[in-house]
Amino acid sequence: MPEPTLFDISKANRRGVRYPEPDVPEADFPQDFLREELPLPEISEHEVIRHFTNISQYNHGVDIGFYPLGSCTMKYNPKVNEDVARLPGFAFIHPLQPPETVQGALGLMYELQEWLGEISGFTDVGLQPAAGAHGELTGVLIIRAYHRDRGDEKRTKMLIPDSAHGTNPATSAMSGMEVVELPSDERGNVDLEALESECDDTLAGIMITNPNTLGLFDENIVEACQLVHEAGGLVYGDGANMNALLGTCKPAQTGIDVMHFNLHKTFSTPHGGGGPGSGPVGVVPELADFLPSPVVIRAEKGDEKNAPFYDFHVPEKTIGRVKAFHGHFGMFVRAFTYMISLGKEGLRDVAESAVLNANYLRALIKDSYNIPYDRMCMHEFVVQGEWEDAPDIQALDVSKRMMDFGIHPPTNYFPLIVHEALMIEPTETETKETLDEVAQVMNKIAKEAREEPETLKTAPHQTPFGRLDEVKAAKDLILNTSLPEDYGED
Ligand SMILES: *Cc1c(COP(=O)(O)O)cnc(C)c1O
């Protein structure tokens, strides 16, 4: 049953707030602006609070329950990040303030660049891009600028493995690249033979995700980067899965030349309806001059030789600005707070626990689900939501049934190379008790798939809304159900 709307609970003359009699003369308000016919619900304050609190519970979030949305790293967002982002010195500054008045903020941006560089092995980092996909676009534009700068105009071919996130081919195409898909080998790695056959003088580069979207560390990463470099191309790293690598592997050392970070995944800034993302880009020294402008540098200024002064710097061959002002500053504060509150050891713990949690859950459900690439996984793994002896059941049915147990469904139907894929990423912030419970639920659902498939087919049963017509929901979207039916008819 849908929640009653504000109009359903409205009763004439109820008020949330009652104003005292004015003790000043009434102003002459232009009456034309008052629309008598405008329907406004009349409700007391506590009814309004209950209404919105109730409907807020319809939405699943990391603060409500398990959220294993693969590739999205829906980890807990520590609340101290929010406190720090709201400090007046961060929250109330203006992006056009002169640098000398915002040294603290610039210092934070500089330190964040340094930390991201240290974690990944890249020497230079730009913070501007607004999200992962935007970081990809920035990175591919940097690759394009690098080749053009050398007068190598014919390098327009971008190789993309078939397991890649859809944003990879999209950002390549937007940058004017010709996208060529590469197959994966039987262990889920980049297929080196196929890669080699594409290595010619039109190669701009490759976009590679490591660990890849199957949750597997690409065992061919070093050879793949070497092949591309020998052919004169560059390697773009999709860093969305950095959560698995923090403190254990620096992507730059495996041969990657430019990579984006998803601060909203790896570094716990909220995402998924929770706020804007942030997709900083790290580069090797050869590409530093092409970074979007400006970056923050630590300069020496005036007599205060020892006091650092932070300033903006426009890289010499910059691809230009990719975002208004300096990017999503509030996200920088949250991500940096997360980093310094965990410290070096803590960040390494994050990756180790993320990998341990994923492998633990994988081991607990591997007898009930088919796991196509069954080897030690990194921070996530992919199972199949289909069984030979349950011909009608699809991954979608498994996901819908999980909702009955207060669990957000895993990522469905991605990566595309796995039939009926369910991509599960528990993240490091879940306890063993939660993982045990989730495994129990998933094993129960696998059993139901064979014994009572109808229960899955008609799920969810326990949520405020039942199974939606997915086509109608997309094609005939009604966002505002709170207006009375006759509103706006004439
Ligand atoms: C999330 C993700 C992206 C895109 O990042 P956004 O921040 O959502 O734009 C790219 N690649 C992979 C593998 C991802 O998981």
Image: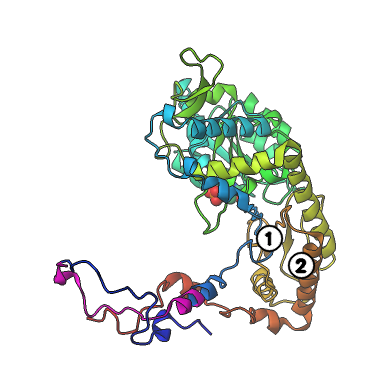
Q: Is residue 112 visible?
A: yes
Q: Position of residue 164 (x, y in %)?
A: 61, 48
Identify which residue is drawn at 75% across, 75% down. Answer: 445
**Could you say whether the residue bearing mark 2 is in a helix, strand or loop?**
helix
Display colour scheme: rainbow
Residue at 48% x, 73% y is 473
Q: Was residue 46 drawn as part of the magenta stretch in this picture?
A: yes
**Which labelled disc corresponds to residue 398?**
none
- Answer whether residue 411 is magenta in the image: no
* Side (left or right) of 462 relative to 478: right
Question: Is 350 on the left-hand or right-hand side of 24?
Answer: right
* Mark-to-mark CA distance, 1 and 2: 10 Å
Q: In the rendered view, tell whether residue 160 sits above or below residue 199.
A: below
- Image quadrant in which the C terminus is located: bottom left
Number of numbered discs visible in the structure rendering: 2
Identity of the amino acid at label 1?
A: Pro
| Residue drawn at point x = 84 percent, y = 63 percent | 364
Amino acid bearing label 2: Val
Is residue 201 toward the left or the right of residue 118 in the image? left
The crowding category of the residue bearing disc 2, from other C-alpha atoms within 10 Å (few below 14, some 14 to 19, many at least 20), is: many
Q: Nearer the viewer, residue 261 or 346?
A: 346
Secondary structure character of the magenta stretch overall? loop
Label 1–label 2 contact, CB within 8 A: yes
Question: Is residue 328 visible to the viewer in this orientation of the structure?
Answer: no
Q: Which range is magenta?
A: 28-50
How crowded is the residue under tag 1: few (<14 C-alpha within 10 Å), some, or many (20+)? many
Question: Camera-side residue: 270 or 256?
Answer: 270
Report which residue position mark 2 lands on: 438
> Mark 1 falls on what kind of element?
loop
Residue picked out by circle 1: 68
Locate residue 52, reporting x and y percent: 49, 73
